[in-house]
Image (cartoon, rainbow, N blue to C red):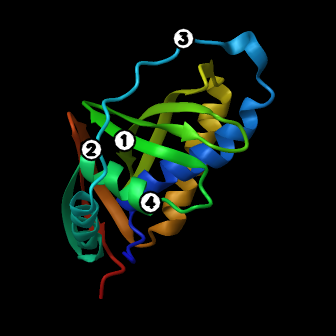
Amino acid sequence: MLNTRSGALGLVIACALLSMSCISPCYLGLGARNRAPTATPLPTVPPSESAASSFEEKARAFQDSTFRVEFTDQEVTSYLALHLPDSVPLSSPRVAFQPGQFTVEGDLTAPVRGHLVLSGTISVDAGKPQVIFQSARVAGVTLPQALLGSLSDSIAQMILEDAPGVQLEQVELLAGRIVIAGRNSATP
């Protein structure tokens, strides 16, 4: 198992974990008033062991004093699909990077069932990642902006706790990939 507590790995996993733990319970109280059209699903990226291994190998760079790492959609999707903990009620996760934006998609299995689509942006402010969720839908129900702001704050705090010593210099979202560069002052 990969033992890196880096901003990038934390960010990718935190997006999936926090969206499942916070969004799905909130869905129960929303009712039909926030119904939205169902989003077009992301293209299916079949998970592969080789792509997940590539993700793990690249993520080791976060332990270096300086790093610049590029992950593809397939590497992140494969890692999540094959290593997402059983405690996270998300099946068939997919991650897509577009210029300036990311999307996490999958099927919630508990406490409610429904298709999840979560999109947002990532930037760097004073060496720390800033995750801003722009939209989220569960089973076609759009979640309110106030909830998305709270989720963004929670993710940022989670990443900061999981990545002591990591100072990001750049997070760039491009078509099909994410590039993360920075320093790790915790490296001996």
Mark 4 or 1: in front is 1
Is tag 2's residue or tag 4's residue first in the polypeptide sequence? 4
Amino acid at dot 2: Asp
Q: Which mark is residue 10?
A: 4
Q: Residue at x 27, y 44 (%)?
A: 73
Amino acid at dot 4: Gly
Residue 65: x %, y % from top left? 24, 76
Residue 187: x %, y % from top left? 31, 82
Residue marked by disc 2: 73
Q: Which mark is residue 95?
A: 1
Task: Give the Cα distance between marks 2 and 1.
Answer: 6 Å
Is tag 3's residue or tag 2's residue first in the polypeptide sequence? 3
Mark 3 or 4: in front is 3
Residue 178: x %, y % from top left? 25, 46
Mark 2 or 4: in front is 2
Q: Tell me whether the residue at label 3 lies in contact with that at label 2, contact meaning CB atoms closer than 8 angstroms.
A: no
Mark 2 surroundings: few (<14), some (14-19) or many (≥20) residues within 10 A: some
User: Which residue of the protein is positioned furthest toward the bottom in this rendering?
Assistant: 188
Q: Tell me whether the residue at label 2 lies in contact with that at label 4, contact meaning CB atoms closer than 8 angstroms.
A: no
- Nearest the eye: 103 or 112: 112
- In-image side of 66 versus 12 (left or right): left
Is tag 4's residue or tag 1's residue first in the polypeptide sequence? 4
Which structural element holds mark 3?
loop
Residue marked by disc 3: 37
Task: Give the Cα distance between marks 4 and 1.
Answer: 14 Å
